Amino acid sequence: MKATVFEAGEERRPSLLPAARPRYLLCEPRYFAVVDELNPWMDRSVQPSPDCVEAEWTGLVRTVESLGADVDVMRGVSGLPDLVFTRDACIPLDGSYVRASFRCPERRAEADHVAAWLRRHGREPADLEPAQDAYLEGGDVCVFGPHVLAGWGFRSSRAGHAALADRLDVTVHSMRLVDPRFYHLDMCVCPLDGRHALVAPEMLDRAARRLLSDLVPEPIELCRAEALSFCANAIVVDGCVVMSQCPPRLRHVLAEHGFEVRCAPVAEFRKAGGAVSCLTLPLNRSTRPAA
């Protein structure tokens, strides 16, 4: 499929496609910069190169489209540099869309803009029921087969997990994160299919590791260097794992399990603590088996 490059500020309208086709929402990176220091990766003295940012983001779009997924693009917003990390602003699941409840005040307006985009395109996002300390960010929610996994400890809270469970009438498995560099679950867990997931066990507490061993028949463990290279912050499109970089050992292990790897380097975005998963909001994510 031929990729299309959009000028800054231009918004791509969604096309009509079969529901089973993977579909992602990305935000053009016109306003991306390291403005605040909200996680250990962010350093205002180390700014991303605008030219490299544009090239990396366009490369990611082309890679995802080349694998058969559809990409919708929303405009960036001045004053919201982290809006490029669309995954964090919403929790899509089984046709429902739940607005994130950000812990950091600097990011709360992102949920408004993603919700507005969804409404313009025929989807009605829901709010979590207000509750004390009910924080929930999209990067903390992963789906492994029928299971909804949610991280807590840095950005999201167990009260946020409970609010999501109530809103969507699902069981949410809470997993505690223990390393502030891995402040969202999608930085240390990446479901690959119904049997496999990339896992960085050092970044989870003992109970979370035990839960994963019960739920995931064949976990693929990342060493610390691989985890610090954002290897778990990946997506899977038609059996192909898309990540920022893939060290030789991990590429070999994934191949042994039947997975192709496609690298879409996003090193400039890693300066703000995000990579491929953070940049892509899966609009038709589901816990239900494909028809």
Image (cartoon, helix red, strand yellow):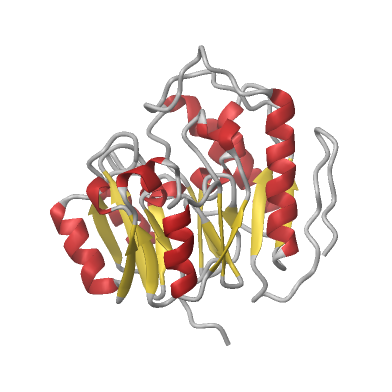
Residue 199 place in picture, x, y as percent: 33, 58
Residue at the spot x=82%, y=55% of the render?
3
Residue at the spot x=50%, y=52% of the render?
246
Q: Is residue 162 left or right of 59 when viewed as pictured? A: left
Which image quadrant: the C terminus?
bottom right
Between 166 and 41, the one lying in front of the other is: 41
Q: Which quarter of the figure has residue 163?
A: bottom left
Between 248 and 280, the one lying in front of the other is: 248
Q: Which quarter of the figure has residue 239?
A: bottom right
Q: Is residue 268 left or right of 9 when viewed as pictured? A: left
Residue 114 place in picture, x, y as percent: 61, 44
Residue 289 place in picture, x, y as percent: 49, 83
Q: Is residue 87 above or below residue 113?
A: below
Q: Is residue 261 above or below residue 289?
A: above
Q: Which quarter of the figure has residue 212?
A: bottom left
Which image quadrant: the N terminus?
bottom right
- Visible residue check, residue 121: no
- Visible residue check, residue 161: yes
Q: Is residue 24 above or below residue 147?
A: above
Q: Is residue 67 left or right of 199 when viewed as pictured? A: right
Farthest bottom residue in view:
291
